Amino acid sequence: MDAINLTETIDTDFIKEVAKESGENPSLCYQCGNCTAGCPYTHFFDYPVSMVMRLLQTGQKETILTSKAIWLCATCETCTTRCPCNIDVAHIMDTLRIMARREGKVSEKDIRLFYDTFLSSMRQFGRIYEVGLLLSYNLKSGHLMADADLGPKVLSRGKIHFLPKKIKGAGEVAKIFERFEGKSDRHG
């Protein structure tokens, strides 16, 4: 890992922007490491959670928004639960992902594709249509046979359904997406 020259790369506006958008105060973090110690995905991250928080405190926008860590975070909220300062660290990670997308700095392309496919399923059906989600993702990602062996097992046990289920309020869910997109167009 390369050394970061904090005096040349600090972005104080980024610190303020993350605090405002997340509603959290990252300066409260005193680097106890509980978030990293409890994170089940730390060994996959390029920067452990506590380091992401420290990078945030020092305004390292480019480093954070291009990191793998924010995209590999599963938002399990272990970090939030373990934080003695009551910082919602998982929400900060969500905020960082949103900011990275907005700036076109998504480092994990397959994860972005999965998020987009997931949201498309929600918008179309008002809930997740698992089979459609997996087929669409596998086709778009080029991982055509990924997890194909699991399909018959989960279908036969009734865990997922071959056809999408109709739900009440699907139109209302679609309206939420339309309202969000309208706001994004005006602000973005």
Image (cartoon, helix red, strand yellow):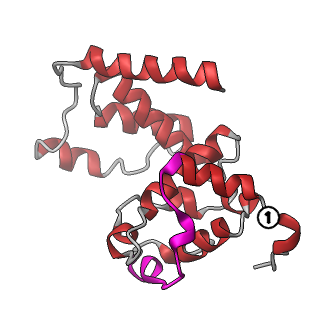
Left or right position of 138 against 86: right
Find the residue positioned furthest to the right: 8
Q: Answer whether residue 23 is magenta in the image.
A: yes
Residue 12: image x %, image y %? Answer: 74, 58
Left or right position of 170 against 45: left
Name which residue type carries label 1: Ile
- Looking at the figure, which quarter contains the N terminus? bottom right
Instruction: Place residue 7 in its image quadrant.
Output: bottom right
Give the residue drawn at x 47%, y 38%: 137
**Span highlighted in magenta in the image:** 21-38
Give the residue drawn at x 44%, y 46%: 145
- Looking at the figure, which quarter contains the C terminus? top right
Residue 41: image x %, image y %? Answer: 45, 71
Q: Is residue 50 visible?
A: yes
Q: Answer whether residue 27 is magenta in the image.
A: yes
Element marked by disc 1? loop
Label 1 environment density (alpha carbons within 10 Å; few <14, some 14–19, many ≥20): some
Residue 171: image x %, image y %? Answer: 28, 14
Query: Number of marks in the image?
Result: 1
Residue 103: image x %, image y %? Answer: 70, 41
Q: Is residue 45 visible?
A: no
Find the residue positioned furthest to the left: 157
Q: Nearer the viewer, residue 56 or 76?
A: 56
Residue to which mark 1 is pinned = 10
Residue 61 higher or lower than 132, as above or below: below
Residue 185 higher or lower than 83, as above or below: above
Left or right position of 173 against 113: left
Give the residue drawn at x 37%, y 35%: 133
